Image: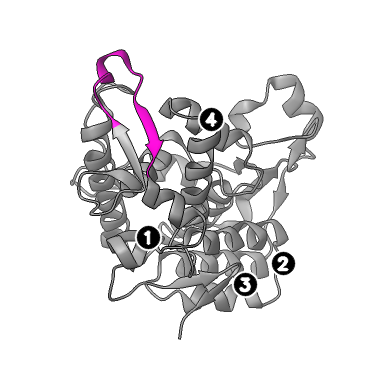
Amino acid sequence: MMADLLAWYRMRKNYSDDLFSNYLAYAFDAPEPMTVSIGDEPETGPHIDGERLSEASEVHLWVTQSLHDQLLIALIVLLFDRFKFDHSKLRVVEFPETHQKWPIRTVGELNPETINRLNHGPRSLDPEQIEELRKVWRAYTSNDPGLLIEYLAGSSSLPFLQRAMAELVQRYPDVQTGLNRWDNALLQQTIENGPLLLRVFGYTWVFDDTPDIVGESYLFDRITKLGGTNVSSPLVSLSTSDLPRKRPIVEITDFGKRVLAGEANHVEENGIDDWIGGVHLTPDTVVFRDRDRLLLS
């Protein structure tokens, strides 16, 4: 399991390093290298203070109903398994889906007064829920999308978790257009609110109310998959001429309009190299979806 955690960390770090090598010019300073480790493992990796966690009488996890927060619960259960901690001391404080008609994307959006008003106190996880969280992590990290379908088809003792996991299906390419839900939203907002890229990102977030909350880096990754230099038939054109002023420009191409209208397929034209959890989508292994159903045959 230690090797698995480090492999997961290395994969995420390589993805971030590759993404930000192109993105740093207008968004961030270069990240500081991490020099801490998992447990006693000497290799560079994320820091987990196992001794402190083992001595705690309770461990509280504050989460929303978003996909990344629900997956965080599953990851913490995995770490409890790895370090042989007592799961009975794990407590979850879960916040409602919306506040004043706006979706709650992260706990960090809430001020202390709102947190006090909205939270209903910590709750423990029973053995059935712990096992479901293990099952979810296996489904999420597996290279077999059938495990996700199997989980979504069954009953759940954690309905917020199952609803959030259902959003993963929308990250698969549509059988008609080859676009995932975020690709489709970015193209639509490019037409309606472009050409400033950050404005396109902003409107993409504002009009999304699903549990699949993503960050700026994910949207940048998606837009480069639609119009990067390695795309043979770009769906968008990206202008980098004004990167020093942090104002990149994006415009939809004629081919992008055809794809958005369902007259052409992005994957069939440009191929695919994408990850959804542990599933690697390539031209030979691509899995399409029809609305909210994965097409495995």
Please give the residue where the numbered disc 2 appears in the rendered image. Answer: 157
Q: Residue type at mark 3?
A: Leu
Q: Is residue 295 located in the magenta-colored stretch of the structure?
A: no
**Along the viewing direction, whichever of 18 and 112 lies nearer the viewer:** 18
Judged left or right of residue 118, residue 126 is: left
**Along the viewing direction, whichever of 232 and 62 lies nearer the viewer:** 232
Residue at (23%, 25%) from the top-left corner? 30
Label 2 packing within 10 angstroms: few (<14), some (14-19), many (20+): few
Q: Secondary structure at mark 3?
A: helix
The alpha-carbon separation of the residues under discs 4 and 2 comes to: 41 Å
The alpha-carbon separation of the residues under discs 2 and 3 comes to: 12 Å
The alpha-carbon separation of the residues under discs 1 and 3 comes to: 27 Å
- Mark on residue 152? 3
Label 4 packing within 10 angstroms: few (<14), some (14-19), many (20+): some
Q: Residue furthest top?
A: 245
Q: Position of residue 178 (x, y in %)?
A: 43, 63
Q: Say whether marks 4 and 1 touch (CB < 8 Å).
A: no
Q: Position of residue 227 (x, y in %)?
A: 31, 44
Q: Residue type at mark 1?
A: His
**Along the viewing direction, whichever of 111 and 51 lies nearer the viewer:** 111
The alpha-carbon separation of the residues under discs 1 and 2 comes to: 38 Å
Q: Say whether marks 4 and 3 touch (CB < 8 Å).
A: no
Label 1 packing within 10 angstroms: few (<14), some (14-19), many (20+): many
